[in-house]
């Protein structure tokens, strides 16, 4: 007998909820069709219990009929399977100057999607009203009903207390501090509403879409700011106060005399974010106004722009080398407007990480550009809702007609 | 309805194992006594199924009779409860020059304990033979039998591949590289054997003993080397290759010209470990031979020793500030021979962490000395085994008489 592999079992599993209708669903979630008799054998539940729980799941739409099994005489028994297309998610990616709204199913398939120009600084009611209006338009355009929504997922460009869905002192979001996003959305859509910061959501989306088999996964967003989303043992890690992944204010060696907007010196964000790279190039007399100008110059072969991106990559790599020592991820994905745009930045990152991190931790490590790109956040907002609404406790509460506490 | 708090549900739950005898046990694990009828209601299982599963759990010793409930007429029904005293764990903390062996129950209570002088460099067979002999003596001294052992937990002073229990190129353990610790121990004791590095085990032990309610917990060991154990969302994080928590080779700003044994410059371990502090003090003409001398001098009020410890604390604090940004733990515990010994090192750590880390992440952060001290590893070795043998999948396999794969 050898020890179990990998993660130890969670100790706080809600044991009291085991063996209820939700468990039947977790069994069916693999997509395989089963008869009532097969489900009774697999779960040890009484046949009558299985029958009534299948009825409840059918009523919820999450489980549908999936043909008939072979008969051993008499009427052939019906089979049942999870139906991810049955319910929908409204996903919104709120950026500083845009909002993307999408409708997906519970399998993460995007059914409809629309991008709007919208300033987050217009405040929560203006922004959320546009999300709601656009969501309803997408739903009706796809011929689907509001009643089919299983939940709403929203990514915001600032710190969010995930438990309550309220932004916490978000620097670029005037009017949003402490706003009850969940309550506001639920006045129009009475379904579960989940909110998180954009980087956590991008990590969820990038992993779900492209790296589902990697349980130790790290997503770094390089744009106006620098942040990260951490997935360890398959779970997004938010930390004790929800601030986990705050990479932008880690101190790097080169920048001991560079003042950051946070009041400290030498923060990564003050050296390697889009605005920091722009500042550095302007100091050299290069005419650039914003990050996109730097990327354009680099694409045209401008040596100063290429060197600036590469140096920013080295600075980010210095912090990521610590991440590799500490968390030992198997994949680091570089995204965000500066990260997605090319290999110069990533080359700088790789240079430092592979020099500074221990061989065992880097032998299978991959450092790659985002593949989900601009859709990472939308996919992640959908994924966040799906994980929640299909979890055993929520399925159970939904079937019992019980609202989750709060 | 508001979103679920904290961690999202794991997606890879072994749904096929739900609703079996193991679940009855997870329900009983809270220690509360219940009748067969109560268990049938809680689980939805048929009465006859509950009865046969209780029989199997009684036979395993994990569940015992716990008196009778009030009768509603006729014979009063029996009640059953988890009995953590029924089964034992053999726990071993192997250090560079000592071995501590203990026998605990499944509640983490130490029944017997013994410390031996033993060089890990004598090789795995010599060391493990002493663990086994000592373990059997402790068992018989406590009047208990080898048959009562539920498992063996071993902490080693070097990198271990947790899945197989084999050391991986451990620097101070000649003869141990790739050694089949699990197989060797199981020749004498045919029970589950779990092996991990000492720092991971100290993190488990310190948290279980003193901070069980803190799911985001960080343990740093400062001794001959510097390492850490990370608990996020309640789970020990080992990373993709088991190297997570490797704090000793993170680069710190002050040490860009200090060569580390790993071949890089400026590693934390080359500046702030016991031997590094000794080197620094000898460079100043202070007569010290080992870390204990430094601690003695500091206790006597020697200013150079106090300053050296405080500076080492600042260097460690520089890395821990990044940890706080990245992982947002609510508790950081400082242990190991240098860390346990006093407040000077911790004062240096606090100084830098509270200056460098963002207010939201440090507003409730506690940075404290180890309370479990020399027993952290033993308690953690026991905890590692208990978590494993009481997990649903293992309980299930045990009751079914099935060996876990491998």
Image (cartoon, coloured by chain):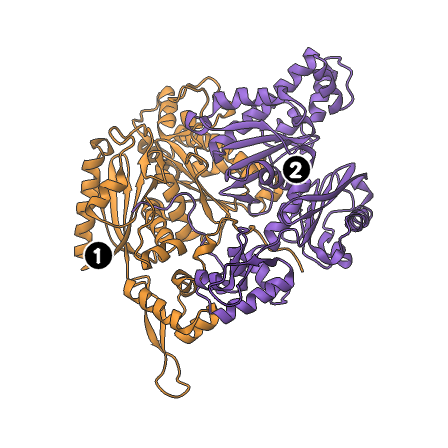
Chain colours: A orange, B purple
Q: Which residue is mark 2?
A: B376
Q: Quadrant of residue B199?
A: top right
Chain ID, mark 1: A
Q: Position of residue A200 (x, y in %)?
A: 39, 41
Q: Position of residue B396 (x, y in %)?
A: 57, 63
Q: Position of residue A183 (x, y in %)?
A: 25, 41
Image quadrant occupied by the C terminus of chain A: top left
Task: Name the residue: 37% across, 46% down.
Answer: B4
Q: Position of residue A386 (x, y in %)?
A: 35, 53
Q: Quadrant of residue A355?
A: top right
Q: Is residue B15 visible?
A: no
**Residue furthest bottom as drawn:** A73
Q: Is residue B93 visible?
A: yes
Task: Name the residue: 52% across, 47% down.
Answer: A330
Q: Is residue B258 above or below residue A120?
A: above
Q: Which residue is mark 1?
A: A147
> Regarding mark 2 in the picture, which secondary structure is present there?
helix
Image quadrant occupied by the N terminus of chain A: bottom right
Q: Quadrant of residue B380?
A: top right
Task: Name the residue: 18% across, 41% down.
Answer: A129
Q: Nearer the viewer, residue B96 or B150?
A: B150
Q: Which mark is residue B6?
A: none
Which of discs 1 and 2 lies nearer the camera? The answer is 2
Label 1, label 2: how many angstroms apart (C-alpha)?
54 Å
The mark total stands at: 2
Tags 1 and 2 on a common chain: no
């Amino acid at each position: 007998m050898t020890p179990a592999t990998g993660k130890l079992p969670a100790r706080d599993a809600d044991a009291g909820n085991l063996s209820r209708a939700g468990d039947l669903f977790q069994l069916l979630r693999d997509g395989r069709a089963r008869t009532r008799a097969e489900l009774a054998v697999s779960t040890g539940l009484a046949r009558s219990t299985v029958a009534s729980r299948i009825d409840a799941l059918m009523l919820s739409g999450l489980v549908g009929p999936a043909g008939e099994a072979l008969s051993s005489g008499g009427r052939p028994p019906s089979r049942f399977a999870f139906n991810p297309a049955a319910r929908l998610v409204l996903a919104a990616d709120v950026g500083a100057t845009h909002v993307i709204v999408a409708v997906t199913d519970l399998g993460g398939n995007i059914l409809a999607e629309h991008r709007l120009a919208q300033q987050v600084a217009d405040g929560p009611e203006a922004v959320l009203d546009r999300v709601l209006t656009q969501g309803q338009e997408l739903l009706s355009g796809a011929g689907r009903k509001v009643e089919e929504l299983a939940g709403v997922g929203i990514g915001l460009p600032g710190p969010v207390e995930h438990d309550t869905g309220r932004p916490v002192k978000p620097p670029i979001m005037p009017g949003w501090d402490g706003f009850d996003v969940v309550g506001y959305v639920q006045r129009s859509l009475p379904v579960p509403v989940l909110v998180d910061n954009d980087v956590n959501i991008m990590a969820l989306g990038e992993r779900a879409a492209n790296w589902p088999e990697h349980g130790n996964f790290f997503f770094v967003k390089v744009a106006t700011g620098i942040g990260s989303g951490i997935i360890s043992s398959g779970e997004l890690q938010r930390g004790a106060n929800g601030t986990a992944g705050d990479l932008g204010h880690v101190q790097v060696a080169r920048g001991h005399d560079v003042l950051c907007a946070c009041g400290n010196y030498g923060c990564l964000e003050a050296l390697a974010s889009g605005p920091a790279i722009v500042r550095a190039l302007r100091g050299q007399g290069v005419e650039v106004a914003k990050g996109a100008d730097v990327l354009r110059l680099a694409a045209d072969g401008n040596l100063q722009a290429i060197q600036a991106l590469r140096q920013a990559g080295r600075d980010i790599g210095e912090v990521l080398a610590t991440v590799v020592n500490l968390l030992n991820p198997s994949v680091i994905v570089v995204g965000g407007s500066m990260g997605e745009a090319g290999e110069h930045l990533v080359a700088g990152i790789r240079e430092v990480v592979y020099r500074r991190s221990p061989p065992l931790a880097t032998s299978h490590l991959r450092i790659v550009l985002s593949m989900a790109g601009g859709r990472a956040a939308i996919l992640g907002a959908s994924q966040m809702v799906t994980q929640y609404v299909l979890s055993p406790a929520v399925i159970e509460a939904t079937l019992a007609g019980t609202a989750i506490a709060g």
